C-alpha cells in the first residue's frame, strides 16, 4: 500500500503540470471553449477544472473516490455552454492519455513498482473514465432534452402579451432567454402588438436572471421594430445582476424608457383619470 500512497501523492504533486500539458495541446478551432485562443477567464477555469479532475482521479485510484457528482456538474455546465459532446469526449480521451503517461513515468522512476501494480492502476484509471463518461453523457443528454422540451413549450406558448387596456400591453419574460427563445419573441411580438393595436408595450424583465450580449442586441431590435410602427416600448424589472452584467458587456439601455417595476411603469402611464400621459 506504500507504493499506492506514493502514486497518489505523485499525481497530486503533478496535477498542475498535467493541466498545463493538456492546455498546451488544444487546437486553434475558432469559437470553441477548448480553443487555444479562448479568453483568459475561460483558460483559467479550464485549468482549474482539469486540476480538480486530476485530483479526483488520484483519489479514485487510491481509495475509490466518488467522481459522479463532479461528472454531473460538468455535464450540465458544458451542455448549457453548448459545447458539442464529441469535442468533450475527445478531450476526455486526451486527459486519459496524459494521466497514463504520468503513471508510466512514476513506474519508471520507482523500482518497487511491479507488473501487478501497473495492471491494477490501468484497470482503476479506465474504470474511472468509464464511470465519468457514462454519467457525463447521460446527464448531458438529459439536460439537452430538457432544453429541447423547454423550447417546444415556449414555441407553443408563444409570446404572452397581456392587454391592460386598449393602448397598453405587458410582455412578461421569465426564465433563461437564449437565442432560440429570442427568435420566437422577435417573430411574434410585433405581430401581436399590432393586432392588439397597442400604443405602449411594457417588457417586464423581473423574471429574467441572465442576459448576454447577443440576446440583449436582439431585444434592442424588437424595441426598434416596435418604434418604427409607432409602438413605444418600456422596460421594467431589470435585476441588479443584469444591470451589473450590462455595464460589464457595454450594453446601452440609455435610450430606452425604463422603470424599476411594472407597477411604477403603469402608475406613470396613467393619471387619476386613467389617461395615458407619457
Image (tube, rainbow, N blue to C red):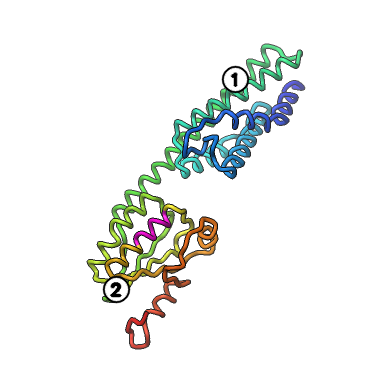
Please name the predominant secondary structure of the magenta segment in the image: helix
154 on left or right of 197: right
Tell me the residue that label 1 is attached to.
Answer: 123
Is residue 196 part of the magenta span, yes or no?
A: no
Report the Cα–Cα distance between label 1 and label 2.
69 Å
- Residue 64: tell me if it is visible: no
Mark 2 neighbour density, 10 Å: few (under 14) some (14–19) many (20 or more) = some
Q: What residue is shown with label 2?
A: 199
Quarter holding residue 167: bottom left
Lateral position of residue 14 relative to residue 256, left or right: right
**Residue lying at 44% horizontally and 62% vertically, measured from the top left:** 207
**Is label 1 in contact with label 2 (beta carbons under 8 Å)?**
no
Judged from this view, the residue extending furthest toward the bottom is 273
Looking at the rendering, the stretch of residues picked out in magenta corresponds to 215-222
**149 vs 49: above or below:** below
Q: Quadrant of residue 222?
A: bottom left
Amino acid at each position: 500500500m506504500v507504493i499506492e500512497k506514493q502514486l497518489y501523492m505523485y499525481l497530486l504533486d503533478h496535477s498542475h503540470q498535467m493541466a498545463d500539458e493538456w492546455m498546451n495541446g488544444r487546437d486553434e478551432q475558432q469559437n470553441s471553449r477548448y480553443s487555444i485562443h479562448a479568453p483568459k477567464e475561460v483558460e483559467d477555469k479550464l485549468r482549474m477544472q482539469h486540476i480538480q479532475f486530476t485530483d479526483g482521479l488520484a483519489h479514485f485510484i487510491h481509495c475509490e473516490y466518488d467522481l459522479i457528482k463532479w461528472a454531473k456538474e460538468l455535464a450540465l455546465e458544458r451542455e448549457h455552454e453548448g459545447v458539442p459532446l464529441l469535442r468533450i469526449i475527445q478531450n476526455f480521451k486526451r486527459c486519459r492519455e496524459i494521466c497514463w503517461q504520468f503513471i508510466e513515468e512514476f513506474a519508471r522512476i520507482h523500482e518497487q513498482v511491479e507488473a501487478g501494480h501497473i495492471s491494477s492502476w490501468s484497470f482503476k484509471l479506465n474504470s474511472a473514465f468509464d464511470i465519468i463518461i457514462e454519467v457525463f453523457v447521460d446527464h448531458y443528454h438529459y439536460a439537452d432534452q430538457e432544453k429541447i422540451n423547454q423550447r417546444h413549450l415556449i414555441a407553443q406558448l408563444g409570446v404572452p402579451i397581456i392587454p391592460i387596456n386598449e393602448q397598453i400591453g405587458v410582455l412578461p419574460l421569465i426564465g433563461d432567454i437564449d437565442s432560440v427563445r429570442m427568435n420566437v419573441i422577435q417573430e411574434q411580438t410585433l405581430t401581436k402588438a399590432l393586432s392588439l393595436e397597442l400604443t405602449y408595450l411594457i417588457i417586464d424583465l423581473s423574471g429574467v436572471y441572465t442576459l448576454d450580449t447577443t440576446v440583449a442586441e436582439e431585444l434592442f431590435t424588437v424595441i426598434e421594430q416596435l418604434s418604427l410602427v409607432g409602438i413605444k416600448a418600456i422596460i421594467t424589472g431589470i435585476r441588479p445582476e443584469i444591470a451589473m452584467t450590462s455595464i460589464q458587456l457595454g450594453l446601452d439601455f440609455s435610450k430606452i424608457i425604463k422603470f424599476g417595476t411594472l407597477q411604477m411603469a403603469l402608475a406613470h402611464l396613467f393619471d387619476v383619470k386613467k389617461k395615458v400621459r407619457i
